[in-house]
Image (cartoon, rainbow, N blue to C red):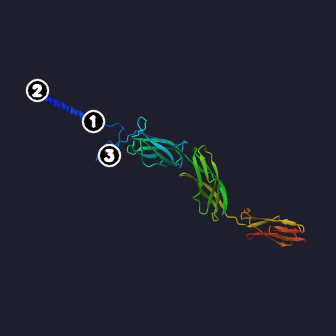
Amino acid sequence: MKQLQMRGQLIVMALAAATAMTVAKPATALSNGPSPGAISGLVNSSLKSVSFIGGDHFVITPNLPSGNASAGHPFPFTVTAKTSGGSTDTSYNGTVDFSDTDGGATLPPPSPLVNGTGSFNATDLNLGRETLTATDSVTPSITGSVLYNVVGYSVGGAVPAVVQQGNVTSTTATVTPQRNYLGTITLSAPSLPSGWTAQFSPPSVTETGSNDTAASVTMLIRAPSNAPTGPTVLTFEGTSGTAVFTGTVTVTVKASSVPTSIVVTPTNPTVSPSATQQFSATAYDQNGVALSPQPSFTWSKAGDGTISASGLYTAGTASGSCTVTAMADRISGSTTVTVP
């Protein structure tokens, strides 16, 4: 009887030990945890929710067919979460923050990756080499960077010009691509002083990214009639996408032309009786410069003979002298004809 009871105790102890071993196995597996990146939503309770994001680092791949990013134009890039072995971690579901070296780029907002990858766009305005960085918003050690080059252009090289008040002058400017810039550059002058205008021919320049040859552009500049005399610095722009680069041109304004004298030619000719002589007149401004365009003249004569509206004089039959006069804007000029 004692032996039987002892055997029963041994059986119960054995069963208890077996039961303990059976329960311990799943507990041991859970405490060891899954391999990194293997599961999502490991623990969910009324207190907290933990989502395992996985990933070891990011790889950023810009899509730049020309090899460079053009200033002011968005360029696409992809971010891929990678395992330590270099394969894509398709279980990554974290949010990525973006930054660049100088803060001059327009970057995406914090964005999640889907199945470990995402496609985005960035726009940079600062020329030169830039570094774009993607960093996990929760685990900063999960990060990746890429170095890329931003290329652009310059506008300027405008030749100084001279213009009279109320008139038009022309000059040339240059648009110069830098580091094989690719894009269309539109020229304008939106910030001119009141009354000034500027036109460009051609109005835009397209750079193909194959060379850095400067393009010449003609500028037609009109000064208002009340523009202050002296040098004036005008600013013009070359815009491509969101990039705006400026140049300047110095225009010296002279007072508007005022006719102050008229010269009639030929001077004091001798014309035979009944013969003809064609006269011409030229008006000059206060600086002794011939007006352009010339005004219309009114012709008259004092003495024998006749004068036409075009300045053709016909001498009389008698000898003597005749004064031929041209007038414009209340200014006149004369010469004397001698008939032998």
Decide: is 257 above or below 78.
below
- Residue 25 pos. (x, y %): 26, 34
Contact, mark 3 vs mark 2 (Cβ under 8 Å):
no
- Residue 317 pos. (x, y %): 90, 71
Q: Quadrant of the C terminus?
A: bottom right
Circle 2 — which element?
helix
Left or right, 212 with reference to 278: left
Task: Residue under label 1, please give it.
Answer: 26
Tag 3: residue type? Ser
Disc 1 versus disc 3: nearer the observer: 1
Could you say which quadrant of the image residue 39 lies in?
top left
Which disc, if any, is residue 3?
2
Task: Residue under label 3, please give it.
Answer: 49
Q: Nearer the viewer, residue 240 or 219?
A: 240
**Disc nearer the start of the sequence (1/3):** 1
Disc 1 versus disc 2: nearer the observer: 2
Circle 3 — which element?
strand
Circle 1 — which element?
helix
Tag 2: residue type? Gln
Residue drawn at 31 percent across, 43 percent down: 43
**Disc nearer the start of the sequence (3/2):** 2
**Disc nearer the start of the sequence (1/2):** 2
Contact, mark 1 vs mark 3 (Cβ under 8 Å):
no
Q: CA distance from mark 1 to mark 2?
A: 37 Å
Tag 1: residue type? Pro
Q: CA distance from mark 1 to mark 3?
A: 22 Å
